[in-house]
Image (cartoon, grey):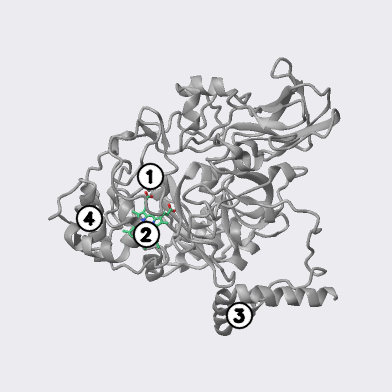
């Protein structure tokens, strides 16, 4: 017991004080990624937008990019059905009907999701080909087409997360909340 | 023609159709390891990797429903025996990016974010860690959504988005301990390696409970359509949490509201409010023989059999009614019953040739019983017509099958 504690202290001293990192590993498998590796892999954008990279783009610039790189699948204006479940534009006032049209304008609670998704997944088949500025621009264009921002507006890492999406308050926490090993009320699957 | 020749001809035939793929495969092989070369040559000999009888015709079927019509494939649950779904019949839902052709030697899993020790693992390193094997179902949140028309007669089309496998891998809790999660972390975001990098938020409490990073399925490596070489396996929850082709886990302090969380997976209620996340699948059972679309050749003895499961735990009881719900009998459950797994039930039955309705209902170890469609409508405060609308998820009402005098079996959910 005692000698293993001593060994442990020696290891801590030798490692220059990185106590938590060293002691938490039981198996010592895997390696530490470089900051550069983490930066290039990490494309997840949170609702508060803290991971958004610097850059900018306007709805006007976005219109040209949309026509060139998106319209072939999503239709000339985005309001067409296209290849998706729902069009990219429209759907206002349909959420309480039997056939709600959940578009990014009528339904999505955060504008950051649009940015994240276009960068990671669009244009389909050429994912990752847009520049950061192009992603801001085409996001701005889709928000403009959904009547959420003005045509003259431009977006960047600070302004995008501040956009109030129309259905933000339409998202409510799941009820009842899920708790490990807790019984659910009949008929509800949290 | 010996087996080797027949295999070779098959390979050549496939080679024409898959010319594009083969070029990609060669490119990988030339710059890389022997692993990539092995991946470029499919099994050619049915003695070295067996095939099923040519008389066994059970197959997955496309659903044909937008937007995943051609890529969503449903399991022929009417053809299954026991509790395991063969890997080749496991239902498939991907997110339109297709199945990536991943060389396991090149694949990496990164764990980072709110951890003291960000880590990158190779698949070989993950396989050196202590492993577990567990039998669990995976069910799509849209499974059992009521259908109209001819498709409603098919148990495969209505209920085939569920499958059950033995999964082998490392507990995610072990990996997170290795990475040392920081105070204040409460969620993680998982990400796949396919073209559009599917991504999904998961509460950390669940990640620490029973989630696997799986590399094995039914004794083999996880199949490509199921996430080869690595996938998340989140027992009992909507299958969309179980990210395939897993390449990254980021530990965070909030859900990230990814595209799917903001669209398909948000539970929109008739009042226009969307519940952010749903997790567990409910208690469910369905008779798979006799079932809609089948025909009983004559009166006489039949074994009624089907599958039952619960995302909340273990199936305790399955009752079957053969008289339109007037009386219920306990079916026999195939032992052992696994947690969050398909459970096979069986009941002997003699059909007297009269019209009748067959149905099953399941109760789990939390005491929750599968509701009727009328009960479900009451709980959700909707009319039963609501369930015919688009986007109804987590539908788990009792499934009635009507047997007509001519022996034909029909879906009687709405009658």
Q: Secondary structure at mark 2?
A: helix
Determine whether, in the image, residue B60 is placed left or right of residue A15: right
- The location of residue B41, given as percent across then percent down, is 67, 76
Distance of mark 4 from mark 3, alpha carbons?
A: 45 Å
The chain identifier of the residue carrying mark 2 reads A
Could you say whether the residue bearing mark 3 is in a helix, strand or loop?
loop
Q: Are marks 2 and 1 on the same chain?
A: no
Q: Residue placed farthest to the left in the image? A: A152
Name above or below for residue A131 compared with residue B349. Answer: below
Residue B344 x, y percent position in the rendering: 75, 37
Q: Are marks 2 and 1 in contact (CB under 8 Å)?
A: no
Q: Which tag is nearer the camera, tag 4 or tag 3?
A: 4
Q: Tell me the tag on residue A73.
A: 2
Residue at 80% x, 77% y is B5
Q: Which residue is mark 3?
A: B33
Identify the image quadrant of the N terminus of chain B.
bottom right
Q: Which numbered disc, 4 or 2, marks the residue that appears first in the sequence?
A: 2
Which chain does the numbered disc 4 sit on? A
Q: Mark 2 and mark 1: span between their CA atoms?
A: 21 Å
Determine the secondary structure under disc 1. Answer: helix
With B45 as the anchor, is B117 left or right in this view? Answer: left
Q: Would you name the residue on which mark 1 appears?
A: B262
Res B276 quadrant in image: top left
Observer-nearest residue: A173 or A39? Answer: A173
Q: Is tag 3's residue or tag 1's residue first in the polypeptide sequence?
A: 3
Q: CA distance from mark 3 to mark 1?
A: 41 Å
């Amino acid at each position: 017991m005692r000698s293993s504690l001593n060994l442990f202290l020696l290891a801590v001293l030798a490692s220059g004080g990185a106590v938590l990192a060293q002691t938490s590993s039981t198996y010592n498998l895997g390696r530490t990624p470089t900051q550069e590796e983490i930066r290039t892999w990490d494309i997840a954008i949170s609702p508060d937008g803290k991971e958004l990279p610097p850059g900018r783009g306007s709805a006007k610039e976005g219109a040209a990019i949309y026509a060139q790189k998106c319209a072939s699948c999503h239709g000339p204006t985005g309001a067409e059905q296209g290849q998706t479940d729902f069009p990219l534009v429209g759907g206002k006032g349909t959420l309480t009907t039997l056939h709600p049209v959940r578009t990014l304008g009528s339904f999505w609670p955060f504008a950051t999701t649009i940015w994240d998704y276009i960068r990671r997944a669009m244009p389909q088949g050429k994912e990752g080909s847009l520049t950061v500025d192009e992603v801001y621009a085409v996001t701005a264009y889709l928000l403009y087409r959904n009547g959420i921002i003005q045509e003259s507006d431009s977006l960047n890492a600070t302004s995008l997360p501040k956009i109030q999406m129309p259905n933000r308050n339409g998202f409510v926490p799941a009820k009842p909340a899920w708790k490990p090993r807790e019984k659910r009320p009949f008929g509800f699957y949290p | 023609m010996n087996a080797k020749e027949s295999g070779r001809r098959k390979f050549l035939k496939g080679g024409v159709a898959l010319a594009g793929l083969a070029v990609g495969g060669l490119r990988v092989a030339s710059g890389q390891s022997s692993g990539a070369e092995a991946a470029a040559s499919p099994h050619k000999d049915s003695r070295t990797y067996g095939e099923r009888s040519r008389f066994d015709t059970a197959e997955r079927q496309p659903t044909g429903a937008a937007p995943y019509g051609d890529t969503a494939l449903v399991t022929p649950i009417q053809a299954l025996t026991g509790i395991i779904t063969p890997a080749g019949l496991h239902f498939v839902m991907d997110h339109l990016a297709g199945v990536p052709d991943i060389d396991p030697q090149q694949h990496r899993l990164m764990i980072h974010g709110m951890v003291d020790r960000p880590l990158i693992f190779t698949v070989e390193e993950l396989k050196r860690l202590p492993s577990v094997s567990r039998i669990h179902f995976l069910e799509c949140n849209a499974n059992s959504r009521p259908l109209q028309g001819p498709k409603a007669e098919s148990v495969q089309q209505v209920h085939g988005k569920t499958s059950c496998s033995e999964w082998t891998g490392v507990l995610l809790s072990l990996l997170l301990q290795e990475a040392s999660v920081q105070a204040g972390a409460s969620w993680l975001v998982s990400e796949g390696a396919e073209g559009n990098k599917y991504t999904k938020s998961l509460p950390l409490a669940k990640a620490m409970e029973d989630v696997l990073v799986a590399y094995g399925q039914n004794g083999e490596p996880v199949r490509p359509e199921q996430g080869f070489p690595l996938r998340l396996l989140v027992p009992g929850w909507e299958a969309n949490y179980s990210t395939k082709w897993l390449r990254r886990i980021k530990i965070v302090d909030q859900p990230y509201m990814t595209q799917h969380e903001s669209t398909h997976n948000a539970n929109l209620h008739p009042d226009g409010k969307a519940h952010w996340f749903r997790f567990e699948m409910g208690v469910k059972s369905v008779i798979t023989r006799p079932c809609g679309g089948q025909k009983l050749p004559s009166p006489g003895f039949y074994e009624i059999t089907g599958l039952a499961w619960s995302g909340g735990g273990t199936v305790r009881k399955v009752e079957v009614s053969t008289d339109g719900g007037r009386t219920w009998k306990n079916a026999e459950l195939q032992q052992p019953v696994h947690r969050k797994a398909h459970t096979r039930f069986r009941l002997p039955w003699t059909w007297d040739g009269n019209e009748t309705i067959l149905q099953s209902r399941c109760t789990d170890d939390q005491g929750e019983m599968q509701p009727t469609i009328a009960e479900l409508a009451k709980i959700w405060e909707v009319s039963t017509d609501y369930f015919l609308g688009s986007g109804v998820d987590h539908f788990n009402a009792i499934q009635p099958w009507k047997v007509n005098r001519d022996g034909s079996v029909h879906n009687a959910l709405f009658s």
